[in-house]
């Protein structure tokens, strides 16, 4: 599936998308606090300064040089000095002679005992998840170990829907009025990326690629029908429905990384067009406002395309966050979040930017999802924290773009989360828990 991209969330009809972004994205988004790379000191490697390093210091005593000595071919300036006994501590190994150079960067001096301490640590936080949410497991199905393998939407009747991907199938789940879940399964040799949407009648539309062929289904649990497009078409990664004409609009890619657009008419005919020859990151998010298709993607940098009278007009926006998600309000204002801590709002050629969170609760953000409340207000769900300690799921909300943003932790050690709002202003989230299962939560 594709990074879950939510849009058209101002109204109860929903559209979104899913994908299989790999953990490389986490390394990109959290480079300052990722897993220890070769030649990087981890949080546990802190010298207490009590003379030569000991096992209690978290350092190997075999890498401590006697006073006044240095390894062959290595300058003592490459090491931190100043231990009380004049010894020098080597923090990592790897050179042929057993020593490693050049790791003073990222350390601070000036401790009371003149020892050096790694400043690039993933500190556990004491923040507790909010108690304002209720949570339930959707199904005991293990999902793909991808950043995004789940999405959520709300139908006009107020029922929650979730789409998620396991190793063998695409799954759709609808939460009934008695709070039980009805599941449908689409077994397929699929590309692990899809687009889906809910129309104004509560009908679910879903499209995915299987062996180069676009497969499309629509209906509801127990009553599905579908067709397919010719091979070589656009592989879906996000979808939106035109409720006036019944046209299905899909954004995706051709080959591995060429951005494309496809539409299915009410009569079932598919047409496909290439948007740009420039390679792009496979995540897309699509929205329909006043008969104009808007498409957010990363390629490279944050890009937005506008399809006006059959022609695409592309523009680059400030920032270079990946995993964009697009929404809009009743006035036609577009809202875009991506893997930074900023929200962009505006119309074609006229954008403003505001931070919806600081870095106080994490180092950067990743895989954000946005929903626009039909009664006013914005909601963003995102992951933040240190990869070493597990990423946490957060919810940010404000009454307006330039209003005061409130942040709350939802879940610790979540894989990803997506957000939608209903007609009454209730906020809904689907995420993958630490056991790899799909979970649904609601507030309000």
Image (cartoon, grey):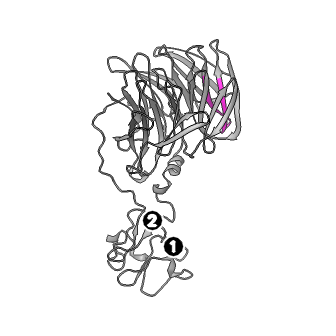
Residue at far left of view:
131
Q: Secondary structure at mark 2?
A: loop
Does residue 170 sit above or below 414 in this rendering? above
Q: Residues within 10 Å of mark 1 (few under 14, many from 20)?
A: some
Percent across and percent down for residue 81 are 43, 79
Q: Is residue 114 visible?
A: yes
For marks 2 and 1, the one nearer the N-term is: 2
Name the quadrant of the C terminus.
top left
User: Can you say whether 35 is above or below 297 in the image?
Assistant: below
Question: In the depicted view, which residue is nearer to us: 319 or 177?
Answer: 319
Q: Where residue 381 appears, x then y in whole percent?
A: 42, 37
Q: Which residues are magenta?
A: 249-262
> Is the residue under label 1 in contact with that under label 2 (CB below 8 Å)?
no
Mark sitting on residue 41: 2
Q: Is residue 261 magenta-colored? A: yes
Q: Quadrant of residue 421?
A: top left
Apparent side of residue 306 relative to residue 363 in the rendered image (left or right): right
Residue found at the far bottom of this picture: 68
Q: Return the residue at label 1.
A: 100
Give the Cα distance between marks 2 and 1: 11 Å
Q: Nearer the viewer, residue 290 or 50?
A: 290
């Amino acid at each position: 599936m594709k990074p879950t991209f939510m849009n058209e969330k101002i109204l109860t009809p929903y559209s979104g998308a899913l994908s299989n972004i790999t953990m490389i994205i986490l390394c990109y988004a959290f480079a300052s606090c990722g897993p220890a790379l070769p030649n990087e000191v981890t949080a546990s490697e802190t010298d207490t300064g009590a003379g030569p390093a000991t096992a209690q210091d978290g350092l190997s005593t075999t890498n401590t040089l006697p006073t006044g000595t240095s390894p062959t071919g290595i300058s003592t300036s490459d090491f931190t000095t100043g231990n009380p006994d004049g010894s020098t501590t080597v923090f990592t190994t790897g050179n042929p002679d057993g020593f490693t150079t050049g790791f003073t960067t990222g350390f601070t001096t000036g401790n009371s005992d003149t020892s050096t301490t790694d400043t690039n640590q993933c500190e556990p936080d004491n923040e507790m998840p909010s108690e304002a949410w209720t949570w339930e497991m959707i199904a005991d199905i293990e999902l793909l170990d991808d950043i995004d393998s789940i999405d959520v939407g709300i139908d006009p009747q107020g029922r929650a829907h979730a789409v998620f991907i396991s190793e063998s199938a695409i799954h759709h789940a609808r939460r009934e009025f008695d709070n039980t879940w009805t599941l449908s399964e689409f077994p397929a040799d699929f590309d692990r990326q899809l687009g889906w949407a809910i129309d104004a009648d509560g009908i679910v539309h879903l499209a995915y690629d299987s062996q180069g062929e676009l497969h499309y289904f629509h209906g509801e649990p127990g009553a599905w029908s579908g067709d397919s497009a010719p091979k070589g078409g656009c592989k879906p990664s996000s979808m939106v429905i035109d409720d006036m004409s019944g046209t299905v609009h899909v954004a995706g890619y051709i080959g591995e990384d060429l951005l494309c657009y496809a539409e299915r008419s009410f009569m079932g005919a598919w047409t496909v067009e290439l948007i740009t020859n420039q390679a792009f990151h496979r995540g897309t998010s699509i929205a329909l406002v006043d008969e104009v298709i808007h498409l957010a993607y990363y390629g490279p940098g944050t890009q937005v395309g506008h399809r006006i009278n059959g022609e695409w007009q592309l523009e680059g926006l400030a920032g270079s966050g990946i995993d964009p998600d697009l929404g809009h309000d009743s006035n036609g204002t577009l809202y875009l979040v991506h893997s930074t801590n900023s929200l962009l709002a505006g119309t074609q050629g006229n954008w403003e930017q505001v931070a919806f969170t600081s870095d106080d609760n994490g180092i950067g953000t990743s895989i954000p999802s946005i929903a626009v409340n039909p009664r006013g207000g914005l909601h963003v769900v995102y992951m933040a924290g240190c990869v070493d300690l597990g990423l946490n799921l957060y919810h940010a909300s404000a009454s307006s773009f330039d209003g005061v943003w409130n942040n709350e932790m939802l879940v610790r050690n979540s894989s990803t989360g997506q957000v939608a709002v209903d007609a009454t202003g209730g906020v809904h989230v689907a995420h993958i828990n630490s056991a790899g299962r799909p979970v649904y939560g609601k507030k309000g």
